[in-house]
Image (cartoon, rainbow, N blue to C red):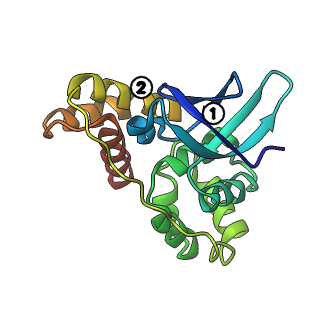
Amino acid sequence: MYEYIIGNLTEIHPAYIVVENNGIGYQIASGNPYQYSSQVNQQIKVFVHQVIREDAHILYGFNTLEEKNLFLRLISVSGIGPKNGLAIMANEDHEGLITAIESSNITFLTKFPGVGKKTAQQLILDLQGKLGDVSAIKQETVDSSKENLALDEAMQALQALGYTDKEIKKVHKSLEKEPSMTTDEYLRTALKAMMKK
């Protein structure tokens, strides 16, 4: 099992990044691949968790060990698969997530794609009182001038996380009125808006 990969960030896609190490390009799924925009063609360290299925071997990537550990706690819950876990991790308000679990806030938890009332209750049952050692780390924003492309990329990333076309169209409309942002900023803003609906 891999703990982390150090290598050159060569590509960014709506659902994953590619990190090259010793001539091998590793496809690493990420909740917000565009947070790495400022590090393209630079060496990065990504903490990873490997999921092996009959039809695929998938690497899920995180900036910190704390983020990885939070993801592992999430997918240990019945009803939360790796894709759901990644979608939950994409909203970087990890303290808000932990608070929601500790305070049994089902309304907050059911705003994540793929999380219904039953799964939210299971999250609370399994994780309440067990997340004290997981801390949230804020990510840095990056500069970019390609605002239309950035917004389109952010919407593709939302789709990859499992949000519906209806939800995406609604948030797209509101983001068009905002000042131009980077893909990373658009995605963060969209995820925050999803949680307020």
Q: Position of residue 68 (x, y in %)?
A: 65, 54
Can you give x and y, in whole percent of width and height, for residue 76 in the image?
76, 55
Residue 124 appears left or right of 107: right
| Mark 2 element type | helix
Residue in the picture at 71% in, 51% down = 75
Looking at the rendered structure, the number of numbered marks drawn on it comes to: 2
Please name the amino acid that badge 1 sits on. Answer: Ile
Q: Residues within 10 Å of mark 2 (few under 14, many from 20)?
A: some
Mark 2–mark 1 CB contact (< 8 Å)? no
The quadrant in which the N terminus is found is: top right
Q: Is residue 16 visible?
A: no
Q: Is residue 156 left or right of residue 15?
A: left
**Of 197 and 1, which appears nearest the observer?**
1
Q: Nearer the viewer, mark 2 or mark 1?
A: 1
Above-or-below relation of 100 to 195: below
> Could you tell me the amino acid type at mark 2?
Gln
Q: Which mark is residue 156?
A: 2
The residue drawn where x is 42% and y is 25% is 156
Residue 194 in percent (x, y) is at 37, 47
Q: Is residue 161 visible?
A: yes
Q: Residue at x 52, y 35 (%)?
A: 161
**Residue placed most toward the observer, 21 or 116:** 21
Q: Residues within 10 Å of mark 1 (few under 14, many from 20)?
A: many
Residue located beneath label 1 in the image: 28
Looking at the picture, does residue 172 appear above or below residue 80? above
Q: Earlier in the sequence, mark 2 or mark 1?
A: 1
Which of the labelled discs sits on residue 186, or is there none? none
Tell me the element at label 1.
Answer: strand
Q: Observer-nearest residue: 64 or 172?
A: 64
Nearer-the-camera pick, 69 or 117:
69
State the separation of the CA atoms marked 2 and 1. Answer: 17 Å
The residue depicted at 55 percent of the width and 69 percent of the height is 135
